[in-house]
Image: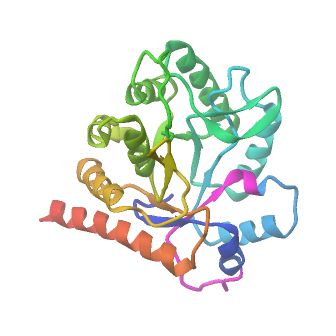
Amino acid sequence: MIPAVAAIGLRHPHLPGLAAEPAGAPLCAPWVEVHSENFLCAGGPRLAMLDAVAARYPLSCHGVGLSLGSAEGLSREHLARLKTLFSRVKPALISEHLSWSVTGGIYLNDLLPLPYTEETLGVVSRNVDAAQQAFGARILVENPSAYLNFPASTMSEVAFLRRLVKNTGCGLLLDVNNVYVSATNNAFAARAYLEDFPGEAVGEIHLAGHSVVPEDGGTVLVDTHSTHVCGEVWAHYESVIARVGPRPTLIEWDLEIPALEVLLAEAARAQAVMDARAAIRVA
C-alpha cells in the first residue's frame, strides 16, 4: 500500500539511478509514480529498470492515454497493454484523467476537455466501469486543467465528479494546481471548489508548477509541470489537508526536469504540511 506521505513522479532522467540502487539501500522517496504509457513495451532496458524500481518502491501508475471521455468506448488493445503492465509491476494506485484524447483509433496527444452533461456522465461512467473491470482494481480519476467553459454543461465539475464516484465506485485524484489553473483562467473561486470537493473520495493529491503565458493582452495559466509549485497552490494544499487530512501527495515535474534533490525538496515541503496538520490533531 502507498502511505499518506509525499513522494515524486519518476521521470526518465532519474530512472537509471533508482533502478541501480543496491538491495537494502535507503529509499530516496517513500513511493514513486510513473506514466503508464511510457512502459507499454514488451521488454528492453526501460521496462527492466521499472522492474528494478517496482521491486523496491511502492508504485503508482498514472495514465495519460486511456481517454475516459471517448464516446466510442475504450480501446481494447490499450486496456490489454495496460493490464499486462499492471500485472507485471503491481501498482498500489492506478489513475487517469477526466478527458478524451482518442478518436477513430487516432491519439491526439492532448488531454481534451469535456462538457459536463448527463450524456457525458454516462459515457465516462461506462468507460470507468470498463477500465476497473479490466484491471480488477479501483482507479482514481483526476480533475483536469481547463482553459474554457462549455455552454452546454449542465452541472459543475465537482458535481460531475461526485456523481461519477457514486456511479462507479472510483476514487479521485485531486490535482490542486489544476484547480488553481482552471479557476484563474475561468474566473471562479478555487477555494470554494476545493471546499466542495468530495474529500472522502480522494486517494491521491498532485502538486505541480505552471507557466504564465501572454494571450490577447492578458495572461493564461498553462499546466506545464515545468517549475516549482507556486505560493497560491501551496496555500490551497494546506487548506485541503486541513479539511481532509493527510493523503498520498505527489510532486509532478515533466518539463525542464531538475536534479532529483529539487524534487525531493518539494516533496519535503508537502510532507511538512501534512506533519504539521497531524501534530495539530494529536495536540
Query: Looking at the image, which residue sits at the far left?
Result: 283
In this view, 269 is above or below 247: below
Query: Which residue is found at the position 33% from the left and 41% from the top?
Result: 199
Does the image show residue 27?
Answer: no
Of residue 197 and residue 137, the one placed in the foreground of this image is 197
Give yes or no for residue 11 being in the magenta stretch: no
Across and down, in percent, residue 12 comes to 70, 69
Q: Quadrant of residue 267?
A: bottom left
Q: Is residue 8 left or right of residue 269?
A: right
Residue found at x 57% / y 75%: 258
Highlighted range, magenta: 20-38
- The answer to which quarter of the image holds residue 226 is bottom right
Marker count (numbered)? 0
**Image-based side of 248 in relation to 54, left or right:** left
Q: Is residue 83 left or right of residue 164?
A: right
Residue 85 shows in this picture: yes
